[in-house]
Image (spheres, rainbow, N blue to C red):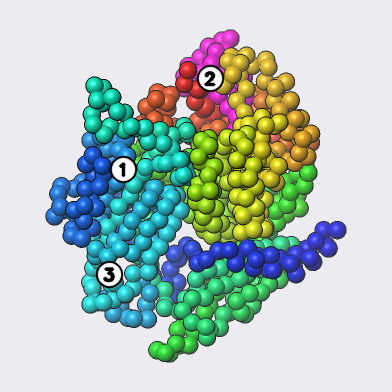
Amino acid sequence: MLRGLAGAWAVLGPLLWGCGLALLQGGMLYPRESRSRERKELDGLWRFRADFSQDRRQGFEQQWYRTPLRESGPSLDMPVPSSFNDVGQDGRLRSFVGWVWYEREATLPQRWTEDLGTRVVLRIGSAHYYAIVWVNGVHVAEHEGGHLPFEADISKLVQSGPLSSCRITIAINNTLSPHTLPPGTILYKTDTSKYPKGYFVQNTNFDFFNYAGLHRTVLLYTTPTTYIDDITVTTDVDQDTGLVNYQIIVQGSEHFQLEVCLLDEEGRVVAKGTGGRGQLRVPSAHLWWPYLMHEHPAYLYSLEVKLTAQTAAGFVSDFYTLPVGIRTVAVTESQFRINGKPFYFHGVNKHEDADIRGKGFDWPLLVKDFNLLHWLGANAFRTSHYPYAEEVMQLCDRYGIVVIDESPGVGIVLAQSFSNVSLQHHLEVMEEMVRRDKNHPAVVMWSVANEPASFLKPAGYYFKTLIAHTKALDPSRPVTFVTNSNYEADLAVPYVDVICVNSYYSWYHDYGHMEVIQLQLATQFESWYKTYQKPIIQSEYGAETITGFHEDPPLMFSEEYQKGLLEQYHVVLDQKRKEYVVGELIWNFADFMTDQWGDFHRTQSKRFLDCAWQTGKFLEQPYRFRATCAQVPPVL
């Protein structure tokens, strides 16, 4: 049967992906250097100003983008990448809502500005939340939504002159509305006896701080004017032969040739192909396996693509190399399978969050986190509750850490957040996610939302449409969302491939009564499975603790209570994983920031690991990751 499925996929796989790709317009390849491509990172200090005017519109009224920012008023030094909230000493900036302005002068290599056969692209890795971009005062791009990259071709601007430098201005607005992802509302305080005129606050329905700014690298990169715009790879296995289906999109010319080579980790060519679409066969393929599932996990091949095009100026070449992991993903009624073997998600939920830098990307912090994941014995995490940096996905590929890739659809609880306006934006966000992350072998499932009000009547149509669209974009991966609704009331779960459920027994309710956990958790699993006959992941569970706080018998917030609560969960999880439970992701990997109305001790500046393993369990069962982790109680 499996042999027949592999043979069918060899024929249908490229066709299905062709159908999905028809929905995606434009590529979003990670900007790698090659023989034909250069990149220039613009990380470092930028000029910065927050628009503190009452309506936050002064920057547009005075056209701050037309001249250097220093000429229109005082500015601050702001590091990029980082969130702006915790860097300065002005208390107003930490909770600022509205438009902020960034500016940077970039020196351009002479060949970029004089060679009309060179295409120069400005790429913003993440700007939270709405961004408008100018180059030398000329509008070049707008983008709605944080966490995902966007680009602008600025060749004509920098090659008219030519210019030795260019001034990049980016205005960012972090305001959240019922139709953004995540949603939010603005509450105006109109009682002038209590609040100044025009006073407002930003309300949200999620429990992490709404950090804002340029969170990831801003860079310039080049390609030839005829270039490789997009590459899509899917893989399968036929007995011991790896199948690599590829599709390549070229922009700039219709007269070109494509050569494709697949290299192993030693640099040996194992397969070749030509043309914009095809299948490479790799005998005795090394498969991409998750960490601890194989003695040689995370094996990556390199797909080298060479474009040769004939233009008016002569022949042009473009080169791009894409890491490729050969693996399969499948879901049955009771299992999640990777490479045909049952896989158990044994890991954590994470946040991109650290002191001072906020959600700003930081290589040392990232590598430390991955070393901790390996030390813990974790094999997976969920990108709660937004897409993480591309470099995070790359390390997951290299370290064998399996990813549930989640959209910023957290806090969707208001009726207006299920409107057609919201749905259209959500569909676009999923397109951007799939476009960016589709080639990562570590990404095995898409999550379209976290804890929405999926019991509301409009939720059924909303999620049916959203999940169907995501499946059309990527037929190769299962799709889910994370629910905390009752199994009888949830209107969206019928459309998922895997049920992800959050529950906090004896923490959000039945406070302090750990004796009810096993019964309630078993009932939860049995009810969901009897109703839907789908595999289940316990996508969040845990209890907060204050480090060093001890009580015996255990009381809430003590280390003993956290340990005892987790042990009660583990009894049931160890039973149900033999049947249909396919994973457990503890909340949370490490501390993160909340608003001031949140739990006070989670706003410490010291970053610490929330998770630790139980030595005996870890040594006896290397697959068994156990953690003591934090969860914020409700505000009473």
Mark 2 or 3, closer to the camera = 3
> Residue at 67% of width from left, 15% of height from top?
515
In magenta, the rendered stretch is: 538-566
Examine the rendered structure and indicate whether residue 294 appears above or below residue 109: above
Residue situated in front as seen by the camera: 195 or 319: 195
Mark 1 or 2, closer to the camera = 1
Which sits earlier in the primary sequence, circle 3 or circle 1?
1
Kindly report the distance in space between the C-alpha atoms of the residues bearing marks 1 and 2: 40 Å
Q: Using the image, tell me which numbered label, if any, was put on residue 98.
A: 1
Q: Is residue 57 left or right of residue 618?
A: left
Mark 3 or 1, closer to the camera = 1
Kindly report the distance in space between the C-alpha atoms of the residues bearing marks 3 and 1: 32 Å
Secondary structure of the residue carrying numbered label 3: loop
Residue 337 located within the stretch drawn in magenta: no
Can you give x and y, in whole percent of width and height, for residue 55 in the image? 26, 42
Can you give x and y, in whole percent of width and height, for residue 109 in the image? 28, 72
Q: Circles 1 and 2: CB distance less than 8 Å?
A: no
Residue 110 showing in the rendered view: yes
Amino acid at circle 1: Gly
Category of crowding for the residue at label 1, using alpha-carbon neighbours closer than 10 angstroms: few (below 14), some (14–19), many (at least 20) = many
Examine the rendered structure and indicate whether residue 165 appears above or below residue 54: below
Can you give x and y, in whole percent of width and height, for residue 303 in the image? 58, 69
Q: Which residue is mark 3?
A: 108
Kindly report the distance in space between the C-alpha atoms of the residues bearing marks 2 and 3: 55 Å
Examine the rendered structure and indicate whether residue 446 appears above or below residue 230: above
Which quarter of the figure is the N terminus placed in?
A: bottom right
Residue 612 position by quadrant: top right
Q: Using the image, tell me which numbered label, if any, was put on residue 559.
A: 2
